[in-house]
Amino acid sequence: MLNSPFEQFKIMLLYPFNIYDIDFSVTNISVLILIITFFLIGASLMIRKSLSIIPNNWQIFVEAIYQFIFSIVKEQTGTKGYKYFPHFFTVFFVVLAFNVVGLLPFSFTVSSHIIVTLTLALSYFISWIIVAFRTLGSEFIYVFYPKNMPAWLLPLLVVIETLSYFLRPFSLSIRLFANMLAGHILLHIIAGSFIYLYSISAILIIPIFFIISAVTILEIGISFLQAYIFTILLAIYLKDSLISHAH
């Protein structure tokens, strides 16, 4: 039994490795990220080879998720965002895998670390800015400059819109990180009470067992929900990079 609920999030050094003072050390989080990456690539190749005109149950499931994510892109960005659909499809499964794998026994929750979620969110934030300048050019400035507003109110609104825009990656990453962190801490605390009650009486573990099962199911649902929220917010942010606010 772990002594602290935060011990499950500890990054452990597995193999120190440096090149010209640049740290490339292997840790438990880097190994798990590589395993998840290769698993997703392998699953994608297997699904691609098994595609058929008459789909099996697995193909129906994947196509349902495909349609679900495509509907997000279509509703938020319109036809202009279609070419970015592979990004959303990939990031949904990456975040989902990061979340769900952490629920496995003796595993590690990659998305429970702010450095991972912030890196992912910041990468797309910078990418969407580049897309905005390539697509809208100078009209991108109107994202921070609300139209048809009183002149005396514009300076305040420009400051608010600018802060709101540049805080997006932080709010996006903290939302995912905090939900995963809180959920796993809750599971740890309930599991600790499970062991304590078992030492008192075996009968007492029955209600705790159902509580743990319910919280685990809830955490699986939250894992899907957080992957969905991360994806739809990225689509909303992309909309500002594709559609001009000048009119």
Image (tube, helix red, strand yellow):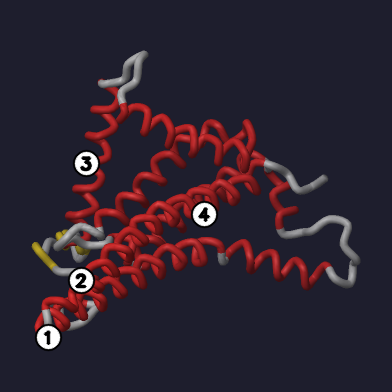
Which label sits in the foreground, 4 or 1? 1
Dot 4 crowding, Cα within 10 Å, few <14, some 14–19, many 20+? many
Q: Which residue is mark 3?
A: 38
Q: Circles 3 and 4: CB distance less than 8 Å?
A: no
The residue lying at 46 percent from left, 42 percent from top is 88
Residue at the disc numbered 1? 200
Q: Residue 73 occupies which quadrant of the picture? A: top right
Q: Secondary structure at mark 2?
A: helix
Q: Estimate the spatial distance between the alpha carbons at disc 3 and disc 1, rounded to whole Å.
A: 45 Å
Which comes sooner in the sequence, label 3 or label 2?
3
Q: At 16% across and 59% down in the image, what residue appears?
A: 19
How far apart marks 1 and 2 lie (CA) works out to 13 Å
Q: Indicate which label's residue lies in the foreground, 3 or 2.
A: 2
Q: Quadrant of the C terminus?
A: top right
Residue count near mark 3 (Cα–Cα under 10 Å), binned few <14, some 14–19, many ≥20: few
Q: Is residue 18 visible?
A: no
Residue beneath the point at 46% across and 66% down: 175
- Work out whether 200 lies above or below 187: below
- Residue 40, image quadrant: top left
Q: Amino acid at mark 4?
A: Phe
Residue that label 4 marks: 125
